[in-house]
Image (cartoon, rainbow, N blue to C red):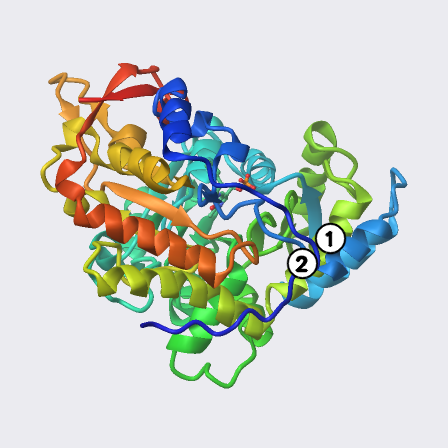
C-alpha cells in the first residue's frame, strides 16, 4: 500500500454532499447527452474536472476577506499584494486581473504585432488562443520525452533549448517579442520545468534580447519538484527556489486560481516600466482601475495570503503527495496512467485502458461517462472529443496521439478516504473494462466541441 502523509490542516467548515444512486446517475447522464459539462455540480460526488478555482481557502484567507478595503482606488489590499509579488516573484510592477487569461490578453495586446511568434515549452489553450487572437503564432517546443506517456524523465515539462535556438535562427529574433515557459507544464500533464532549463532558456534568449515571461499558475508545485529532484536544491526553501526561477524572467502571467489558492483572481507582473504603462492602459479599458483589475479588495487580500500559503512545504508535500498517492494506487493494479504523475492531476491513458475501442468511437469520452455512472466522479476527456479534426485536403479524420482522461485534484478539498474511493471505482471499472462500449455523437458542434457536444453509446 502506498502511504500518504497526514493532512497538515484540520477541518473547520464542512460542505455536505451526497452520492446519488446508480439509477439516478443513469437518468442524469442521459439527460445531459452524456456530456459531463452539463451535469449539475450537486449531482457530482467527487469533482475532478479541474484544480482551477476549486481550492478550499484557509481561515487566514477568510479572515483576510473581512479586511477587504472596497475603495475604488488604491485600496490597502492592493499594497499588500504588491509587497507579496515583490517578495516572492521579485517583479517591480504588476496589474491585478480577474483571472489568468485576462493577464494573457493584456500581455499579448501590449507586446505582439500580427505575424509575430511566441515560443514556449507548451502554451496552455487560453494562452495559445490569446496569441492567435492578436494575429500571432503560438509555437510549442517541448523536449521529446514530453510526448512519451511512459517516459520517467524528472523534468518532462522542459523546453527543448536546441529547438529554441534553431527556431530563433529560422524566423529571426525581430519577429519574437517574447518567449514563455509554463510552470508546471499543464498540457504535458502538470510536469515540472527544471531550474537548469529556465537558466538555459534565458541564456539563449538573452543573446537575442528576447524577454522571457513565465506562466506562473503552478509555480509553488514546480518549486517543490525542483527541491525534490534537482541536484543542489534539496536544502533550499521553496521560496528561495521560486525567487531564483523568477530572477531569470522579465515578467509573468498568473492564474491565482491554482497556486494562489483562491476561487478567482490573477495578475500580470513585469520589470519593464514602458510595458507596465501600456498594460495599465489596457487594464483600465478591459478589467478596471489599475489597483483592482476586475476584483474586489477582499479578493486581492485572499490572493496575497494564498500566494504565501502555497509555498508552505508541509502543504506541498501533502498536495503533491495526494496526486502521487492516487497514481500509485492505480499503478499497483496496472491501471494505465501517464507516468510519472505531475503536480495537479493523474491522467488515465484511455487507449491502453480500453484497447478494444477505436479512437473513432471516443474511448476517452466512454471512460469519462463510466467514471460518472460507476462512482459519481467527474473527470474530463483530453483526447479525440477535444482535438480530433477533419483534414482540410483529404476530408479524413485525424485523431490525436494521446487519448487521456484527466483527474485534476482540487487543493485542500478532498481527504485520503475520497482518493481511496476514486481509486476503488477506477480499479473496479478496469477489471470489467471489456464491458465498456464506445460512443458516437448525436450532436457535434462545429468548434470547441467538448463543451456542448452530445453523445450516446454505440
Ligand atoms: C485547467 C485550467 C482551467 C481551464 C481553462 C480553460 C478551459 C478549461 C479549464 C487554466 C490555465 C492554465 C495555465 C497553465 C493559464 C490558464 C488560464 N487552466 N495557464 O487546467 O492551466 O487561467 O482559467 O484563470 O483564465 O483546468 P484562467
Mark linked to residue 257: none
Depth order, front residue of 321/295: 321
Residue shown at 72% from the left, 39% from the top: 280
Q: Is residue 230 left or right of residue 110?
A: left
Viewer can see residue 184: no
**Label 2 residue near ligand 1, CB within 8 Å:** no
Q: Is residue 21 left or right of residue 392?
A: right
Q: How busy is the neighbourhood of tag 1: few (under 14 within 10 Å), some, or many (20 plus)?
A: many
Residue that label 2 marks: 306
Image quadrant in which the N terminus is located? bottom left
Residue 161 at x, y percent in the picture: 31, 60
Q: Position of residue 241 (x, y in %)?
A: 53, 73
- Observer-nearest of 289 and 109: 289
Does any portion of residue 285 appear in the rendered image?
yes
Number of other residues with Cα within 10 Å of mark 2, as a class: few under 14, some 14 to 19, many 20 or more: many
Number of labels in the image equals: 2
Vertical order, 234 against 56 (above or below): below
Residue 219 position within the rendered picture, expressed as x and y whole percent measured from the top left: 52, 60
Q: Which residue is mark 1?
A: 302
Q: Quadrant of residue 83?
A: bottom right
Q: Which structural element holds mark 2?
A: helix
Quadrant of the snapshot with the C terminus: top left
Side of 224 where 270 appears, left or right: right
Residues 77 and 246: in front is 77
Note whether ligand 1 is within 8 Å of mark 1. Answer: no
Residue 9 quadrant = bottom right
Contact flag, marks 2 and 1 (Cβ < 8 Å) = yes
Residue 412: x and y in percent read 57, 58
Marks 2 and 1 sit apart, C-alpha to C-alpha, by: 6 Å
Q: Residue at x 70, y 35 (%)?
A: 283
Amino acid at each position: 500500500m502506498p502511504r500518504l502523509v497526514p493532512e497538515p490542516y484540520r477541518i473547520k467548515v464542512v460542505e455536505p454532499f451526497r452520492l446519488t444512486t446508480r439509477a439516478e446517475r443513469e437518468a442524469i447522464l442521459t439527460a445531459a447527452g452524456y456530456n459531463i459539462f452539463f451535469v449539475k455540480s450537486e449531482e457530482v460526488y467527487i469533482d475532478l474536472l479541474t484544480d482551477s478555482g476549486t481550492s478550499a481557502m484557509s481561515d487566514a484567507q477568510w479572515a483576510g476577506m473581512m479586511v477587504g478595503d472596497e475603495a475604488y482606488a488604491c485600496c490597502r489590499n492592493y499594497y499588500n499584494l504588491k509587497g507579496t509579488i515583490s517578495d516572492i516573484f521579485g517583479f517591480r510592477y504588476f496589474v491585478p486581473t480577474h483571472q489568468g487569461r485576462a493577464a494573457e490578453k493584456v500581455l499579448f495586446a501590449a507586446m505582439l504585432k500580427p505575424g509575430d511568434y511566441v515560443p514556449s515549452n507548451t502554451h496552455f489553450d487560453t494562452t495559445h488562443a490569446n496569441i492567435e487572437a492578436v494575429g500571432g503564432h503560438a509555437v510549442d517546443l517541448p523536449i521529446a520525452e514530453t510526448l512519451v506517456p511512459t517516459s520517467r524523465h524528472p523534468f518532462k515539462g522542459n523546453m527543448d533549448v536546441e529547438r529554441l535556438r534553431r527556431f530563433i535562427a529560422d524566423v529571426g529574433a525581430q519577429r519574437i517579442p517574447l518567449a514563455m515557459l509554463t510552470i508546471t507544464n499543464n498540457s504535458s500533464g502538470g510536469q515540472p520545468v527544471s531550474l537548469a532549463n529556465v537558466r538555459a532558456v534565458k541564456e539563449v534568449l538573452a543573446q537575442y534580447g528576447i524577454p522571457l515571461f513565465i506562466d506562473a499558475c503552478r509555480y509553488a508545485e514546480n518549486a517543490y519538484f525542483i527541491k525534490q529532484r534537482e541536484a543542489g536544491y534539496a536544502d533550499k526553501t521553496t521560496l528561495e527556489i521560486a525567487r531564483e526561477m523568477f530572477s531569470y524572467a522579465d515578467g509573468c502571467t498568473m492564474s491565482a486560481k491554482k497556486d494562489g489558492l483562491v476561487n478567482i483572481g490573477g495578475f500580470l507582473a513585469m520589470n519593464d516600466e514602458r510595458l507596465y504603462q501600456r498594460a495599465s492602459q489596457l487594464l483600465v479599458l478591459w478589467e478596471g482601475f489599475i489597483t483592482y483589475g476586475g476584483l474586489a479588495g477582499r479578493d486581492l487580500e485572499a490572493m496575497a495570503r494564498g500566494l504565501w500559503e502555497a509555498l508552505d512545504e508541509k502543504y506541498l508535500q501533502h498536495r503533491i503527495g495526494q496526486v502521487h498517492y492516487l497514481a500509485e494506487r492505480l499503478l499497483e493494479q496496472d491501471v494505465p496512467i501517464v507516468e510519472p504523475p505531475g503536480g495537479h492531476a493523474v491522467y488515465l491513458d484511455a487507449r491502453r485502458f480500453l484497447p478494444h475501442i477505436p479512437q473513432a468511437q471516443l474511448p476517452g469520452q466512454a471512460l469519462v461517462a463510466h467514471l460518472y455512472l460507476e462512482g459519481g466522479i467527474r473527470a474530463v476527456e483530453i483526447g479525440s472529443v477535444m482535438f480530433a479534426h477533419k483534414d482540410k485536403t483529404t476530408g479524413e479524420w485525424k485523431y490525436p496521439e494521446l487519448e487521456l482522461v484527466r483527474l485534476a485534484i482540487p487543493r485542500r478539498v478532498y481527504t485520503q478516504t475520497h482518493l481511496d474511493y476514486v481509486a476503488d471505482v477506477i480499479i473496479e471499472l478496469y477489471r470489467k473494462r471489456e464491458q465498456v462500449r464506445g460512443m458516437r455523437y448525436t450532436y457535434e458542434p462545429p468548434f470547441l466541441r467538448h463543451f456542448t457536444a452530445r453523445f450516446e453509446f454505440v
